[in-house]
Image (cartoon, helix red, strand yellow):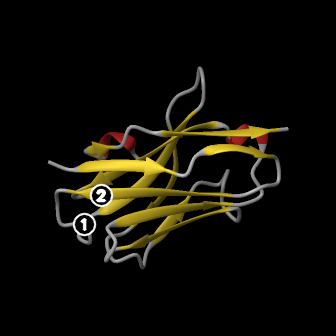
Amino acid sequence: QVQLVESGGGLVQAGGSLRLSCAASGRTFSSYTMGWFRQAPGKEREFVATISGSGIVTSHSDSVKGRFTISRDNAKRTVYLQMNSLKFEDTAVYFCALAPNYFGEISNMYTYWGQGTQVTVSS
């Protein structure tokens, strides 16, 4: 069984930065794709970024490209999301997820999910 625990969310002013962390346990971490998704009130969950098991390959959604960066430290079994130049529309609950046999943006392909961490950006 995999457990994913996010941290690092909070309240920040527009233009500010936050770094989210997601710690994994219970499974070989370095073999699997990790992703970040977010869900704003009244909206569908949307893809934010994903990273391959090795950390070499990454992909970011167009809405965050150039502002957010996904990374991972396999020795620490942790994936990060560095968020810079935050905008009001980035306000959402952010989830990390693990995909055993997939790399991409489709949330249904991610098998394990964390509980989420709230990010609120004030305008």
Image quarter (top left, top right, bottom left or bottom right) of the C terminus: top right
Where disc 2 sits, the SS reads strand
| Residue count near mark 1 (Cα–Cα under 10 Å), binned few <14, some 14–19, many ≥20 | many
Camera sees residue 104: no
View extreme (top): residue: 42
Where disc 1 sits, the SS reads loop
Q: Earlier in the sequence, mark 1 or mark 2?
A: 2
Under mark 1, the amino acid is: Phe
The label number, if any, that marks residue 29 in the structure image: 1
Residue 22 percent across, percent down from the top left: 41, 56
Camera sees residue 4: yes
Residue at left offset 45%, top offset 60%: 50
Residue at left offset 31%, top offset 77%: 75
Horizontal side of 88 relative to 77 (left or right) equals right
The label number, if any, that marks residue 79 in the structure image: none
Rendered position, 88 above or below 67: above
Which residue, given by chain and number where applicable, does mark 2 sit on?
24
